[in-house]
Amino acid sequence: MSGEASAPPVASPRAPRPGIQKSSGAVTRKGDRGAKEKPTTVLPLVGEEEPKNPEEYQATGVLEVDFAELCTRWGYTDFPKVVTRPRPHPTFVPSASTSEKPTVDEQRLSGSCSLNSLGSKYVFFRPTIQVELEPEDKSVKEIYIRGWKVEERILGIFSKCLTSLSQLQAINLWKVGLTDKTLTTFIALLPLCSSTLRKVSLEGNPLPEQSYHKLMAVDSTIAHLSLRNNNIDDHGAQLLGQALSTLHSRNRTLVSLNLGFNHIGDEGAGYIADGLRLNRSLLWLSLAHNRIQDKGALKLAEVLRPFELTHTEVVERRRLLLEKGSQECSRSPSTSRHGDSKTEREKYQLMGVSSFATVEKDKTQTMKTPKGLGKKKEKSGEVVKKEEKSGSGQSPTQGTPKKEDSTKAGKGKVTIPEQKLSKGKGTKTGSKEKRSMLLESEQLVGEATEVVSPLLEPMEHRDGKVFMPGNKVLLHLNLLRNRITEVGLEAFLTAVQYQAQFSKSRSASKGPVGLLWLSLAKNCFSPQCPAYTTIQELMLPRDPVSKARHKEEAAVASST
């Protein structure tokens, strides 16, 4: 500081900014102020070259080493440390043999802790990067950043060191001062990370433009997204609902979405419900602690049971059906028949060429003649003679057989008719199997198309209107602590009753069956309300947690 005191007053520097190295040289001239106070180091955006680090840094895969080295190279002297996330201690349950009074050692320990409590508080609140490690190889599994601002320069450093973490599964950012610009940079960083990254939590980061929907783009790989405490209102809910699904696009990777503790009202709940109409990937949704009333509850309950398609949805469904039909017609029937005859020809090569020709002629005959004539032919004893003459090219319907033919065929009377009959039955069953296989393949194609577009699901037509069965993929819906009254409760009761009846009818088949868990507690109705009680009774046998608890209780009761 003596060098600073000897400098002229005009050239006295300001206090250095946090994270910028201090200069050790003294200022001798007025124009050398920039030599003493370095300009603010601007870290590059994701994908840009490092302007002041020509030597490319190769990440080692150890976050603590990589982050510290990169921060040092970019001029940071005081930067957050990478520490292991502390585990909560198990609660102490005193036993009968333990005295309730604190011992002398405990009193001394508490006194020493109180002496260092001030320092421990400062250490606790220092910015850190908490990591959770895999127990086997100690690789980073989850990252937690809480309570300090993550600027774009820090994200530039993360773009260098996070990409080498091969086991990274989750990133949690709580109150880190994100902006719409830094969120865009963060989203550009995610594809550079490992393919195991599936969970992102951005809580306590309100954005002016509410651009959280960019995390749910069509090409996003995020499966679990938490956006609690972000002041998301109806406009933000509209963007999120459109990211869930629109008429021509839908998110196919997001499995759980937590929108709790926001400012979503009836209009926003309606936008979320619109997104659930054609979304078939979201299984878990939380809208707890919002401002949803009966109007929004009615919209959410509507998509859980059969609902009417809009005019635009009906037009899009017709377009998709026409496109599907044209794709099926593009598969030439002649090609499929040729393929079938080829496989049959290979099948009957082991049985003889003449028998194959007989079966082929029987096929043409059954196609050209009525069913009654075909049955009469099979019943007559002339089948054996016609089969022998078929080898010489004579039609089975030409002329009448001679008695010599029956005597000539006497030796083969046992085998040839059995082959003929078995072959005849075999061709019939084979054709049935082929038909069933074709039907199954068409069903598989239809199911694959249904995954692409739910508008191709089986619909119900009533009074000139088209009704979709409803969203049965959503398994968990949390509406705790909203403003729903008995009016909205009745709508959910109707939806739950429909899904319960539907699941009973499809108990032996596979496929989604609807909600397994529904929370409507702490709303604007009495817990003793009949509709609420009925909903709880209907949902109790569907809840997998309650099923497991009942099994455990039954096992304990049986063991005792």
Image (cartoon, rainbow, N blue to C red):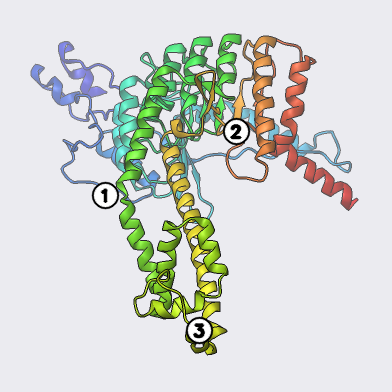
Q: Give the quarter of the image for residue 502.
A: top right
Disc 3/disc 1 C-alpha distance (Å): 95 Å
Q: Nearer the viewer, mark 3 or mark 2?
A: 3
- In the rendered structure, which amino acid carries the disc numbered 1? Gln
Q: Which mark is residue 179?
A: none
- In the rendered structure, which amino acid carries the disc numbered 2? Leu
Residue that badge 3 annotates: 403
Q: Position of residue 472 (x, y in %)?
A: 57, 32
Q: Nearer the viewer, mark 2 or mark 1?
A: 2
Which one is earlier in the sequence, the residue at label 3 or at label 1? 1
Q: Is residue 91 visible?
A: no
Which one is earlier in the sequence, the residue at label 2 or at label 1? 1
Q: Give the quarter of the image for residue 378.
A: bottom right
Residue 465 left/right relative to 517? left
Residue closest to the eye, 81 or 378:
378
Disc 2/disc 1 C-alpha distance (Å): 44 Å
Q: Position of residue 362 (x, y in %)?
A: 44, 66
Which one is earlier in the sequence, the residue at label 3 or at label 2? 3
- In the rendered structure, which amino acid carries the disc numbered 3? Lys
Determine whether the residue tagged by mark 1 lies in a helix, strand or loop.
Answer: loop
Residue that badge 1 annotates: 58
Q: Give the quarter of the image for residue 222.
A: top left
Q: Nearer the viewer, mark 3 or mark 1?
A: 3
Residue 479 left/right relative to 78? right
- Residue neighbourhood size for the residue with mark 2, other residues' Cα within 10 Å, grouped as few (<14), some (14–19), many (≥20): some
Residue 248's place in the image compared with 328, above or below, is: above
Residue 521's place in the image compared with 22, above or below, is: above
Q: Which residue sits at x=49%, y=51%?
A: 440
Quadrant of the snapshot with the N terminus: top left
Residue closest to the eye, 516 or 285:
516
Residue that badge 2 annotates: 475
Residue 264's place in the image compared with 355, above or below, is: above
